[in-house]
Amino acid sequence: MPALARHLFRGLLLLLALTAAAGAGAGVAGARPTLLFTDPGSDTAVSDPPQSITLMFNEPVTPGAPAIVLHEGAGREIPMGAAETARDGRVLTARPADTLAAGTYTVRWQVTGADGDLVEQDFRFAVGLALTGDGSAADGPSTSWTDTALRWLLLLGLAVALGGLIAERVTTTARRENPSLPVLRSPLVAGALIGLVGVLGLGAALAASPAR
C-alpha cells in the first residue's frame, strides 16, 4: 500500500476509534457502565406484551435498589419482580408482575459500575403502538433498531480495520525475511469503509432525530 494511502487510512482509523469511544461514553463519564442494548428496544414498539425487561451493559454492574422501575403512560408504577443478572453481571433482567396492556411505558434503571458510581437513566417503549417524537403514541407498525445496528457496524469496521493493520505489519516483516512469501490482501480498506458507513449512518440518524 502506498505511503500516502497508508497515512490516510491510519487517520481514518483514528477517527473511527474516537467516534466509537465517544459513542460508547455518551451520557456517562469516565469508565461508568454504558447501556448497549435493551429488550424491548428504546423508542420502539412491540406487537405483543414483553415478558421481561432486559438491559445489556458493556461491563459487569451491580443492580440498584430498585434496579428497574416501570411506569405506564399515565405515570402509574407497574409492579416488577426482582432483577436478575446474567453473563457475569453484564445483563440485567426483570419481569412485570402482570401482562402489560397496550400503551406507552417508561423504564427507569439504576446500576453501580466497577468504579462504584451510581448510574441511572430511562428509556421508553410501546406495546401495540408506535411512538411519536413527542412521546405520545399512535397506531402503527414496530420500528427498527437502526441505531443499534449502526453502532455494531461501526465497532465491526473498527475491529476489521485494526486487525488488517496488524496483519499488514506482520506480513511486511515476514516478507522482508522471506521475499518469496505471497502478498496477502489486507482487510484494512474494507474495515475502514465499513466503519465509515457506521459513522455516517449514526451522524444522519442523530441529525434526523428530534431534540429531547
Image (cartoon, helix red, strand yellow):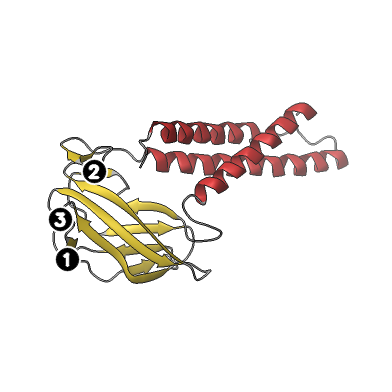
Kindly identify the amino acid type of the residue bearing the numbered disc 1: Ala
Q: Which residue lies furthest to the right in this view?
A: 177
**Residue drawn at (45%, 31%) of the image:** 204
Crowding at dot 1, Cα within 10 Å, few <14 / some 14-19 / many 20+, comes out as: few
x, y percent for residue 163: 65, 44
SS class, disc 1: loop
Query: Dot 3 corresponds to which residue?
Result: 100
Kindly identify the amino acid type of the residue bearing the numbered disc 3: Leu
In this picture, residue 210 sits left or right of residue 15: left
Q: Visible in this render: residue 150?
A: yes
| Disc on res. 205 | none
Query: Dot 1 corresponds to which residue?
Result: 97
Q: In which quarter of the image is the C terminus?
A: top left
Position above or below: 95 against 46: below
x, y percent for residue 167: 70, 42
x, y percent for residue 110: 37, 64
Between 99 and 87, the residue placed more toward the observer is 99
| Disc on res. 45 | 2
Position above or below: 212 against 75: above
Between 5 and 18, the residue placed more toward the observer is 18
Name the quadrant containing residue 83: bottom left
SS class, disc 2: strand
Position above or below: 159 against 98: above
